[in-house]
Amino acid sequence: MLRFLDAGESHGPALTAIVEGLPAGFAVSEEKIHEELRRRQKGYGRGGRMAIEEDRVEILSGLAKGITTGAPVTLLLRNRDYENWKNLTEEDTAVQVPRPGHGDLTGEFKYATGNLRNSIERSSARETAIRTAVGALCRQILEELGMTVRSKVHSLYGLFDGEADLFDETVYGKIEESPMRVLSREEEFKTLVDSAKREGDTLGGWIRASLRGCPRGVGSFMAYDRRLDAQLAFAAMSIQGIKEVAVGNPFHRLTGAQYHDGIRMEEGKLKRLSNHAGGIEGGISNGEDIELWAYMKPIPSVKIKLPSVNLSTGENTDSRYERSDVTAVVPGSIVLENVLAFEILKAVLLTFSPDNKKELEAALNYRNTRQGDFR
């Protein structure tokens, strides 16, 4: 089974991950991983950390001349900001005032280290850098198998972007060039960010990721934890700041007759007349685009003072501010893309159980030739 374990702290020496279960025989490019890491660092409303880091991953195991061998792949991503922290003392970095909405206080309840900094370091969204690297590794295999994943920002606070075909090259080119990763109303989005920044506040919004080319039959309704939509929902919700998840457009308000996707046979192949289900029915992929939506809450670090408590004295006080973005929906869209890529590859490998590229391609080719053959 494809799986990974990551480790590291926000201001520690490095983030690392070990990815186990990749089939042998697939070409992997470090530069393609670097490109996804660069995409994650971009975006209007980012904070000062992105001016410090230049995220590049080192692959330490699992490849032979750039080809997967079936062995675990080790990824290492060094934190440049560590140089600014490594000589600080425990007293310099100690934190006793939790920020509402962050993992500061709950982490201290659970681990009781006496310093909120320990919770802050591991719960930080800096961890999404290594998760993006893991997904970027997996999406290269998906691309060889004919699967493409893309994303966009759909809303910020109460401002919504229009519908967009993410697989129209002209449309997606505009989204990729936009610092807000939207198709329209870019200046309105930027104005909203500027306003929140002046006020010392933060903003959240909806992001969308789509994957085209997933074969039918991935996932299962035979057990609750093998349902593909359940797996995607879990993965999306595990991204820092995500509070709502949907498969299929969550903004549709339709009756049953309007919502459910009609089926027709055309030229010997099944065709769906719409895709309100987001590519998954009964926990199993139906061959349409996988549509994953997620709502990212406003970042908890705000300059506006919120009620908090000094845990060392028990006194009521104001919350503290720590360097942060105004909004993370732009990098969040890139993270969601790569989380989706990992989960789909994991589900595909679980469905077809291959150990190498030839076996996986043969299994997929067989499945794809059965369009409409139900005997």
Image (cartoon, rainbow, N blue to C red):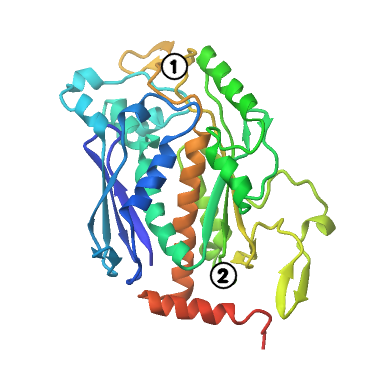
Q: Left or right of 55: which side holds 374?
A: right
- Residue positioned most to the bottom: 375
Quadrant of the rendered structure where residue 15 is? top left
* Structural crowding at the residue carrying mark 2, measured as other residues with C-alpha within 10 Å and reported as few (<14), some (14–19) or many (≥20): many
Quadrant of the rendered structure where residue 84 is? top left
Query: Residue 116: percent from the left, percent from the top?
Result: 32, 26
> Viewer-nearest of labels 1 and 2?
2
Residue at the spot 41% in from the left edge and 60% down from the top edge: 140
Count of picture labels: 2
Note whether 146 is above or below 8 in the view shown.
Answer: below
Q: Left or right of 69: which side holds 306?
A: right
The residue tagged 1 is 308
> Which is nearer the N-term, disc 1 or disc 2?
2
The one of 36 and 292 positioned closer to us in this rendering: 36
Amino acid type for the residue under numbered disc 2: Pro
Residue at the spot 67% in from the left edge and 89% down from the top edge: 375
Query: Residue 228: percent from the left, percent from the top?
Result: 55, 62
Amino acid type for the residue under numbered disc 1: Ser
Residue 152 seen in this snapshot:
no
- Residue positioned most to the front: 170
CB atoms at circles 1 and 2 under 8 Å apart?
no
Query: Residue 143: percent from the left, percent from the top?
Result: 47, 62
Residue at the spot 32% in from the left edge and 13% down from the top edge: 313
The one of 39 and 335 positioned closer to us in this rendering: 39
Residue 336 seen in this snapshot:
yes
Q: Quadrant of the N terminus?
A: bottom left
Residue at the spot 44% in from the left edge and 16% down from the top edge: 308
Note whether 368 is above or below 206 in the view shown.
Answer: below
Label 1 and label 2: CA atoms lie apart by 50 Å
The residue tagged 2 is 215
Query: Residue 202: percent from the left, percent from the top?
Result: 52, 23
